[in-house]
Image (cartoon, grey):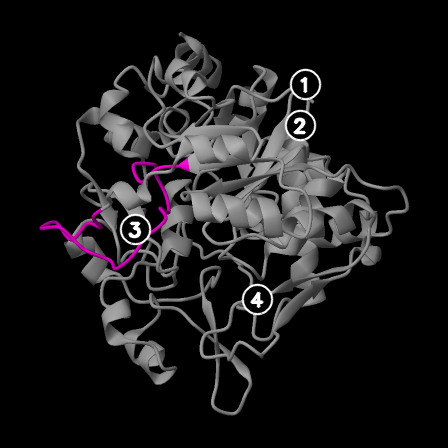
Amino acid sequence: MQLPRIIQGGMGVGISGWQLAGAVASAGQLGVVSGISLDEILIRRLQLGDPGGHMRRALSHFPLKDMAKHIIDKFFKETGKSADEPFVQNTLPKDGLTEEREDLVVAGSFAEIFLAREGHKGAVGVNLLEKIQEFCMPTLYGAMLAGVDFVTMGAGIPREIPGILDRFSKNLSASFRTAVTNALGSDDFKLAFDPTRYGQEKPLKRPKFLAIIASNVLALTLAKKSNGKVDGFIIEGPTAGGHNAPPRGAMILDENEEPVYGSKDEVDLEKIKELGLPFWLAGGYSVKGKLKEALDKGAQGIQAGTPFMLCAESGLTPELKDEVMRSSHEVRTDPYASPTGFPFKVALIPGTLSDDEVFQARPRICNLGYLREKYKKEDGSIGYRCSAEPVAAYEAKGGKLENALKSKCLCNALLANIGLGSVYKNGYHEAPLITIGNIVNDTNFVNSRISAKEVIDYLMEL
């Protein structure tokens, strides 16, 4: 498979949806689907009447027809729900995922990748966060059922993912060590996934695995100590949108409460080259001429997010695209916003959760739980907590108050970014929160009428 010059970033929840990934792939570069919350996206689209019939068309190709029919029968609404009617949504996992929830994750991932690959022969990838561990394996397997070509992953140390891909390609079960706060090093907590329930007898294509990294140490660790083949690296700098790697060493904040990055956070590309694997540069490379700079540094190409986020095929709602492009907006690296504990890039836009008045008015609700943290209770059992849940509940579970006060519910906010925000019986509608790269104010050519193909043409100009 020919390696791409441009990797379209796997952004947000549904920002990098099947329409965007398919458009990029059909133009000859790597289109990437965001692999986050695909089960929730699937059932919410079905409840809205499945505009265009895309979800049902994808599920008609799902290997298990009875399972697909069950999902459609349970969630599809012919006329669609009203704007003020709450979604029927998944319940929070209590002790891992139930089989029914696993099936939804597999089916949602399959549907998104199937649609992204439809109608062309280009390459399609899926992006996941290592931090979202409970949903990782069923998302990967669903994507592989649909023929995904690449897997990209950051926000953690994904040493076990290459081996999981190897096993899934043979339809073998796999396990994944899961992080548990307060657990001793000798404790061995694992998640397991058995693909035999999906009845595949033929081997599946093993996608290439690209690790998203921000340090030479992590690159070396993954190249030498992963349980399978790492096929390349995406080297992401701190100006990239979404989650950023924290600075190395102690966290120091500037006068705006942003993390201070220094020379220790710069990746030595000469040492990366010594690993003999292709790499792409990301974070500030989404403007004309940067591809040539990356190639001159020995990179295979670049990963770009921001201009794709604002183009026609992006999942961001037209209203939010217009707001982002209407004028320059300050973009800050917020060390508190994400429940993951990773710094998170936030655009300061009135009417979104970056507006403190909007943030303070939001009821603290944790009803989706993708970013919850597992912790070991005193009795040895596993509990769940999230710094964005009600403060009293979080503290009662041993969480620290300082982690909660400024933490934002990304699960609900990012769904609101794509027009699938939660609605409650009291009339409250979840507010969005825009994450975008610092480069946004240098990409003024982008608007919602620009296509992904035109973005690629612009980025390819040397």
Circle 3 residues within 10 Å: few <14, some 14–19, many ≥20: many
Q: Nearer the viewer, mark 3 or mark 4?
A: 3
Query: What is the residue that sits farthest to the right in this orientation?
Result: 201
Label 2 near label 1: C-beta < 8 Å? Answer: yes
Q: Residue drawn 78% across and 55% down? A: 195
Label 1 near label 4: C-beta < 8 Å? Answer: no
Q: Give the labeled residue for mark 1.
A: 120
Circle 2 residues within 10 Å: few <14, some 14–19, many ≥20: many
Q: In terms of sequence position, does the residue under pointer 3 or pointer 4 come before the other?
A: 4
In this view, the residue in front, 162 or 313, is 162
Q: Give the labeled residue for mark 3.
A: 247
Real-space CA distance between mark 1 and mark 2, rounded to the nearest whole angstrom: 6 Å
Return the x and y of residue 268 as percentages of the image width and height: 39, 35
Using the rendered view, name the quadrant where residue 323 is placed: top left
Q: Give the labeled residue for mark 4.
A: 178
Using the rendered view, name the quadrant where residue 428 is placed: bottom left
Indicate the secondary structure of the residue bearing disc 2.
Answer: helix
Q: Nearer the viewer, mark 2 or mark 4?
A: 4
Stretch of the chain drawn in magenta: 236-260
Real-space CA distance between mark 2 and mark 4, rounded to the nearest whole angstrom: 31 Å
Q: Give the labeled residue for mark 2.
A: 117
- Amino acid type indicated by mark 1: His
Q: In terms of sequence position, does the residue under pointer 3 or pointer 2 come before the other?
A: 2
Query: What is the residue that sits farthest to the left in this orientation?
Result: 255
Q: In terms of sequence position, does the residue under pointer 1 or pointer 3 come before the other?
A: 1
Real-space CA distance between mark 3 and mark 2, rounded to the nearest whole angstrom: 37 Å
Label 2 near label 3: C-beta < 8 Å? Answer: no
Q: Magenta stretch: residue 249 in it?
A: yes
Q: Residue drawn 17% across and 37% down? A: 330
Q: Residue drawn 68% across and 34% down? A: 114
Using the rendered view, name the quadrant where residue 328 is placed: top left
